[in-house]
Image (cartoon, grey):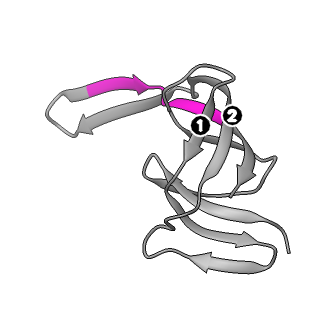
Amino acid sequence: MSEYAIVKTGGKQYRVSPGDLVRVETLPGEEGDIVILEEVLMTSLDGVIAFGEPILNNSKVTATIISSGKGKKITVFKYKAKTRYRRKNGHRQPYTDLKITEIS
């Protein structure tokens, strides 16, 4: 079996393995900084599966920040018929790319 974990960051859950590249909600830090994700919900190490209730206390996932930026622009358009109400906005979601280095 492979080594993996399910972590929670930015209100979302991700299944990660060592060596994976993951795009998550923006995290503080510069390129090359090490980030420790401590909200681990589940791990599978050497075929032994451990579940948290809701998180595992002695588990952590170590990752390195590869890059940060803004995602592709989306258009937010509000419209109400027959009232001349139109609003057009754009949004670019900030993100951080992480490279998972270790699960412990």
Q: Position of residue 45 (x, y in %)?
A: 75, 70
* Amino acid type for the residue under numbered disc 1: Val
Q: Quick one: 86 or 48, which is closer to the camera?
A: 48
Instruction: Please give the residue where the numbered disc 2 appears in the rendered image.
Output: 64
Q: Could you tell me what secondary structure mostly forms the magenta stretch?
A: strand
- Please identify the residue farthest to the front as the structure is shown: 58
Residue 76 part of the magenta-drawn span: no
Tags 2 and 1 touching, CB below 8 Å: yes
Q: Quadrant of residue 99?
A: top right
Q: Which residues are magenta?
A: 87-97
Disc 2 crowd, CA 10 A, few/some/many (<14, 14-19, 20+): many
Quarter of the image with the N terminus in it? bottom right
Q: Quick one: 41 or 93, which is closer to the camera?
A: 41
Q: Position of residue 85 (x, y in %)?
A: 19, 29
Instruction: Please give the residue where the numbered disc 1 appears in the rendered image.
Output: 35
Earlier-in-chain disc, 2 versus 1: 1
Q: What is the number of callouts on the image?
A: 2
Q: Quick one: 24 or 53, which is closer to the camera?
A: 53
Callout 1: helix, strand or loop? strand
Please give left or right for residue 19 compared with residue 14 in the image.
right
Q: Position of residue 82 (x, y in %)?
A: 17, 37
Callout 2: helix, strand or loop? strand
Q: Compared with residue 55, is residue 12 higher up or lower down, i.e. above or below?
A: above
Instruction: Measure how far apart labels 2 and 1 are at the Cα level.
Output: 6 Å
